[in-house]
Image (spheres, rainbow, N blue to C red):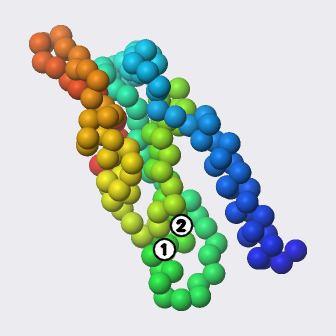
Amino acid sequence: MNQSSVSQITWQFVEAMEKKGLMHLNWPSDEKEMERVKEKFEKIRGLPNCCGAIDATHILMNLPMVNAANDVWFDREKNCSMILLGVVDAEMRFRVAVTGWAGKLSDSFVLRSSGLYKLCQNGTRLNVKKVKLSEGSEIGEYIVGDLG
């Protein structure tokens, strides 16, 4: 089978998986479900009011280099890649997945360009309620992640 046929079949497979996956990939639908997520983070890691954990990875790709514009897909390790940014709950279930961004871009750029970030900025996400800590201070809802 030639490479273009394999690429076409692979692309159709990825699109079908994405369509099916979106039915299972969702932010907690109500306050009760979010409370369960936050309770699990506090129980297993001592993180009060934590709504998820975020990180990014690079998915290696095999793209034909037909013009110089394709170098945007090369990450800092010179691999041709696409970024996958994900938020998981305490049971390691994906709640948010952002993909399709070129490997050359930074994780923070991808996050700031995502719908999740915009929802957090306008108060739709991570804005339900604050929790009082033992010493009297309050902590709002948050997602834990590394510096990237």
**Which residue occupies the foreground of this view, 128 or 139?**
128
Residue at the image point whose x is 51% and y is 80% from the top: 70
Left or right of residue 57, residue 3 in this image? right
Q: Nearer the viewer, residue 51 or 16?
A: 16
The count of marks equals 2
- Give the farthest residue toward the bottom: 67
Residue 124, percent from left and from top? 32, 34
**Image spot of residue 64 (x, y percent):** 63, 81
Query: Foreground: 98 or 88?
Result: 98
- Mark number displayed over residue 81: 2
- Among numbered discs 2 and 1, the one appearing first in the sequence: 1
Residue 34 is drawn in which quadrant?
A: top left
Q: Residue at x 73, y 70 (%)?
A: 7
x, y percentage for residue 41? 40, 22
Give the vertical position of 119 relative to 78 (above or below). Answer: above
- The N terminus lies in which quarter of the figure? bottom right
Q: Residues within 10 Å of mark 1 (few under 14, many from 20)?
A: some
Kind of residue sitting beneath label 2: Ser
- Does residue 59 lie above or below 120 as drawn? below
Element on which disc 1 rests:
loop
Q: CA distance from mark 2 to mark 1?
A: 6 Å
Q: Are marks 2 and 1 in contact (CB under 8 Å)?
A: yes
At 49% across and 88% down in the image, what residue appears? 68
Instruction: Please identify the residue farthest to the right as the structure is shown.
Output: 1
Question: Could you tell me which secondary element the residue under label 2 belongs to?
Answer: strand
Q: Identity of the amino acid at label 1?
A: Phe
Horizontal side, residue 25 vs residue 37: left or right: right
Label at residue 74: 1
Q: Is residue 72 above or below residue 134?
A: below
